[in-house]
Amino acid sequence: MQLSLFCPRFVAVVCLLTLACTNGFAQGSAFTYQGNLQADGAPANGQFEMRFTLHDGPTSSTVVAGPVTVAPVEVSNGLFTVQLDFGSGVFNGAARWLEIGVRRYGETNSYAALSPRQQLTAAPYAIRALGALTASNITGSVYTTNLVGTIPDALLSPNVALLNRSVTFTGTVAAQAFVGNGAGLTNLPGGGFRTVPIGSATQAQPNTGYLVTNDSVPVAITLPASGTIRVGETIRVSASGAAGWVIRQNSDQVIYIGTLLNTVGLRWTARDANRNWRAVASSADGQTLVAAVYGGQVYVSTNYGVSWTARSVTRNWQAVASSADGRKLVAVAVGSQIYTSTDAGITWTARENNRNWSGVASSLDGVNLVATVNGGQIYTSYNSGQSWTARESSRAWVAVACSANGSNVIAAVYGGQIYVSTNAGVSWTARGAYRNWVAVACSADGSKLIGAVPGDTLYLSVDGGVSWAQAAASPLMQWTAVASSADGARLAAVYSPGGIYVSTDSGNSWTLRSGAPTELAWTGVTVSGDGSTIAAVPSNGQIYVSSQATTTPGTAGYIAGMRLSAIELQYIGNGQFIPISCIGTVTAY
């Protein structure tokens, strides 16, 4: 039988044996040696005796250590493993060659020797780390087990982060947990929020809160420059100091403040001319407004009421309504027809017949329409006014309103009850008491309703009209019109002669806005869906508009808060900020 020991790792060949050493691992001065033994060209099986001798050269006779005999060595399918230990100190950095002999276990014949000897340059030399070696003498890969001592910083790779150096990471840094309070961290997208107390003017940083403590002078906080804050990042400002705070803008910045409740109706501007105005309506954002003149024309504004253009023909216009985008308009006139427009009032189409139309309402998409006739019926349309169907009975209908999708409809009868429909006007249910109702309005979902009775308080419903209660905080006035924002939180009501009342808490409290005239014969009022714009019309004056969707652009614009007020602003890009939370008294300029 001929034996061969195949060794691709340490290339060596003899006539009888070759050896392949696949790997070795240092454990103290011992290491594991693994190989593949073949007999007669096939993997060997059985027990063998092996002898290992360590030399200082490939051919010299100087023995450094050994021989070490291992027997029996179990060989299975050619594979074997042995533990070798030549003692400490033999692997000192000098070259070493291993001589191996093999014979079957129990035989007494001579060992078959491997020739040439195999140089050891890899795994067994990990034993050298147990000796007194310096890092400067180590090359290649080294196992860290039992390494002791200090490696100088200068010998470390530049990719190693040092504790006493400023480090810039260009890749992703991941960790299961970071420990600490984050003090000193800035420009962290979406995180790392901290709050600091301040008593003097401050340049704000992203993701930072500021608690203003000054009792004598309002503290100015300037928004982060647009180039230093990322989309989605926020700042917060609050005040414990009696003087409050001011948030100032940079030259390219603006704050959208339509959702700030306390800004509604604070400042009013008279627009257009004195006319016999009868009704007014708004798009969802307040940019498009439409107003009707009894004995005149319909007027349209597409710039928040700044300028107005006369549209349509002269009629005794009684009521108007608008879709959310302001493109689809509908108007009704006493003793005339219903008129619809699909181009923001530029052209109008007459619909239905001449009747004493008294009210009209539109869904947000302008598809579902409902109109009332004083002394007649309710009429509904589900195709933007192209065709109409008579509903309910003939009554003294005076006003109508509907939800955003047109499903919930509320109509008022002068000297009668409130009627509610939940199926777009197909069927109706009488609600509330008999009163001289003159106006109604509802929230976008149709759950919050408001109704007006001259010489009485305002009435509220929070269950879609099923039950009604007096708005205890509203005064007894000659109410003529009411309006609601989409969420039902911002309400407006006008009376004649008198002024404009506004509620920012769904009617729980009411404030007479001093910025508007208090002696006009108000006939109509509207609130945009977002609550940022209120417009009111009298029968003996101009159109009055309170619209402030944003602060004044640039450095002239700012918002201010009193003590115990707070606001959080989020950056949405292009120099624009939006409030995502607000408490207390906050005013925009």
Image (cartoon, rainbow, N blue to C red):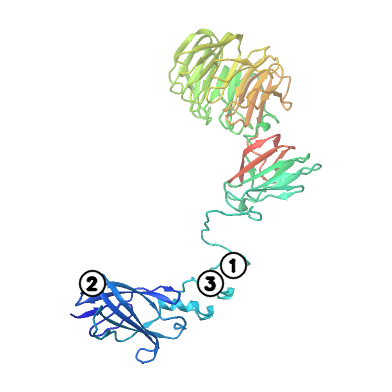
As drawn, 540 above or below 562: above
Q: Residue 114 versus residue 506: which sits nearer the camera?
A: 114
Give the structural element (helix, strand or loop) at label 3. Answer: loop
| Disc nearest the viewer among 3 and 2 | 2
Disc 2: CA contacts within 10 A as few (<14), some (14-19) or many (>=20): some
Residue type highlighted by circle 2:
Asn
- Where residue 443 appears, as percent x and y from the top left, is 56, 24
* Residue farthest along the right direction in this orientation: 216
Give the structural element (helix, strand or loop) at label 2. Answer: loop
Whole-angstrom CA distance, mark 3 to mark 2, is: 48 Å
Residue type highlighted by circle 1:
Leu
Horizontal side of residue 23 vs 322, given as left or right: left
Residue type highlighted by circle 3:
Ser
Disc 1: CA contacts within 10 A as few (<14), some (14-19) or many (>=20): few
Whole-angstrom CA distance, mark 2 to mark 1, is: 54 Å
Q: Earlier in the sequence, mark 2 or mark 1?
A: 2
Q: Which mark is residue 162?
A: 1
Give the structural element (helix, strand or loop) at label 1. Answer: loop
Residue of label 3? 157
Whole-angstrom CA distance, mark 3 to mark 1, is: 11 Å
- Where residue 396 appears, as percent x and y from the top left, is 55, 8
